[in-house]
Image (cartoon, coloured by chain):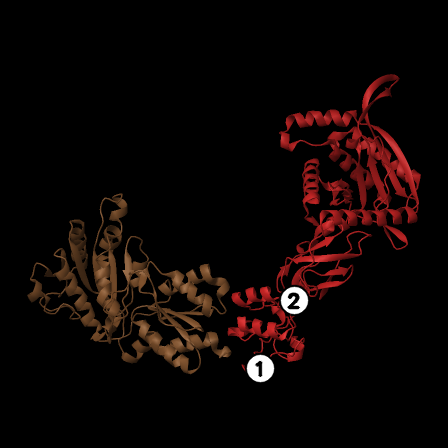
Chain colours: A brown, B red
Amino acid sequence: MSRITYREAVKAGLREALIGDPHVFLMGEDVGRYGGAYACSKGFLEEFGPERIRDTPLCESTFVGAGIGAALGGMRPIVEVMTVNFSLLALDQIVNNAATLRHMSGGQFSVPLVVRMATGGGRQLAAQHSHSLEVWYAHVPGIQVVAPATVTDARHMLGLALREPDPVFIFEHALLYPMEGELDESPPADLLHAAIRRPGNDVTVVTYGGSLWKCLQAAETLAKSGVEAEVIDLRSLRPLDMPTVLASVARTHRAVIVDEGWKTCSLAAEISAGIMEGGFYDLDAPVARVCSIEAPMPYAKHLEDAALPQPEGIVSAVMNLVGRHV
Amino acid sequence: MSEFRMPSLGADMEAGLLVAWQKKPGDKVRRGETIAEVETDKGIIEIESFADGTLEKIVVPEGERVPVGTLLALIQTADEAATPTASAAPAVVPPASATPPPRGAPSPAVTGELVPTSSASTIPRRAVSPAARRKASELGVNVDQLPGTGPGGAVTLDDVQRAASAAPPPTAAPPPAPMTDAERAARMRQTIAAAMSRSKREIPHYYLSHTIDLEPALAWLARENERRAVTERLLYGVLLLKAVALALRETPELNAIWERDRAVTRPDIHVGTAIALRQGGLIAPALHHTDRKSLDELMAGFRDLVNRTRTGGLRSSELSDPTITVTSLGERGVEAVFGIIYPPQTAIVGFGKVVERPWSIGGQIVSRRVITASLSADHRVTDGHRGGLFLSAVERLLQEPDKL
């Protein structure tokens, strides 16, 4: 175990991939000379050269499309999109090409593309750089969507994604890059399984990405009141590991879903519906959701804080469900 | 508040076993809707509500056998619900430290709190978490009277478990096993014995018979059935039923029910049709409004009744409503049947088999298919004169089958 930052973990994963396979190359806005918008590829241009570390124009549709083409042509491209807000320009390439070509070619082609992008708010970057739109991708069959929340997942998910024959989208919460954590050198077994980050028997808190740490903080507060929350880190947003969630709910009988996306049509909504379908008779209280408020992300700090899920809100959602039993 | 009691499904019924509730407290019920299943000597009968409203409270749990007239449930009728009451307060939630209600006394009256009493226009369904509901049914805990400590006063898993540990263990009262066929057959015989003995003891029967030329009806039926798909064909029995029902309009005195010490003529004609059961015995459920139904409706209704009589699923009104019974033993080769009246009805009509007989028409002897109709009637209520008019009417009606 060693202590590194999330950024260092992402960088180590990228570096390992570039060294390990000559077909791997990195492409995106400012990944070369600037070293990456979040400094995840600093020094790579010098180390791997301009053939493999390619700066692209500000045109998401073009460079994501180029990545799809390269993947079809036998390369293993890693495309970095600066934030999920900007990735919407590439939605056509992603939804209509990356996600469909295996299906439409009757399995003759696959698109082994990895796209990384930053997501999430909390940095006063306002309404065009701060949203959590990963659910838009989790909606689409044909692609896999993951969200590393820990340094270990940030370090290893890229390597696992590069083994997949189909497109994988990796969402890195921008607040996590400077976060330090213990790195577990042995890679997780796969991309598909949710992880129980904190065991507990009173309530299941389901979350992913940047919200994991708010949930763990809330769980500590709850523990002081005698409420033991089980915190599940989904890791994979598509497919969802509902068996892990349902097994936990069967023990705790209560669930709170914490999702930085907007509540309407959110991942939280999908998970909630999955609990209704598979765990209705286990529930002792209605499923609760803690999501971002339904507004474009405010710039002002106090408003942005108020718009995002916060540990206090998670605590009160849990207490609402279990309060009188404590 | 209307009281829903164990109905009498025949003069001979003394008790019924509440097999299952089909409605829960808080559920809306409509008049005529099935709300419970009761096992009687005649099998499992679906009991209908006689009022529109909301099922307020279940008094007799599933699995109990109770005498006729026992209060089973309370129904808040629709017009009561329209009157606002002051008790619409939300459930009071006991503090977390509330001790469980004393052993054996889990009623809200004792704990002095909560239970959203019937509020105005909507009686809110008791909020019980799915997990609590499942646990309650496993442990046999009645959630309707539990204090709820969950969000919004909902009954939670903990509440159920607390109640289960406070309440006396469910005193090994598994619902009595349903009767075996042999037991049911034995009971059925006892039931018939009681009813028929009482009838013969109390009712002064008189008997009439009348042989009816059935040729026109059968010829019409043959022509009619030729035009129809096999599944739509009519049996001659429905012509007989319709003729009886229409004849009763002309002699309503026979469509009467004996109440205490006198007969009361019933405005509606519900002919009970005797249906033999495979395991022995018989039931005569009503084909409601027999006189107003078309032959097709009667045919469909009769098929349905036979089906449900033999598989279970008769409705309480079908057993309690017949105003007269028709029995036919023709298919068993019987020429004429003189039935015993099923109290509190005051008449029973019998039909024998269709036979070919020499028949004189305008001085000519011809061969005709005929049937013997008989009437057993209560002499306290009608006389032979009235009975004769009735059978003549049946005969006349059967001569013009296309008008039935």
**Which callout, 1 or 2, points at the residue further toward the start of the chain?**
2
- x, y percentage for residue A197? 34, 71
- x, y percentage for residue B133? 56, 65
Task: Please indicate, yes or no, whether residue B404 appears anywhere in the rendered image.
Answer: no
Number of residues whose C-alpha sits closer than 10 Å to that of mark 1, classed few (under 14), some (14–19) or many (20 or more): few
Spatial CA distance of label 1 from label 2 is 33 Å
Task: Please indicate, yes or no, whether residue B244 appears anywhere in the rendered image.
Answer: yes
- At x 78%, y 55%, the residue is B8
Quick one: quadrant of the C terminus of chain B? top right
Disc 1 is placed on an element classified as loop
* Badge 1 and badge 2 both on one subunit: yes
Specify the quadrant of the image occupied by residue B368. top right
- x, y percentage for residue B214? 79, 27
- Which of labels 1 and 2 is toward the front? 1
Q: Which mark is residue A145?
A: none
- Above or below, B203 against A191 in this view is above
Quick one: quadrant of the N terminus of chain B? bottom right
Residue B375 shown left or right of residue A89 in the figure: right
Q: Amino acid at mark 2?
A: Ala
* Chain letter, disc 1 residue: B
Specify the quadrant of the image occupied by residue A32. bottom left
B284, B197: nearer the viewer: B197
Residue B280 shown left or right of residue A320 in the figure: right
- Above or below, B211 against A78 in this view is above
Q: Which residue is mark 1?
A: B98
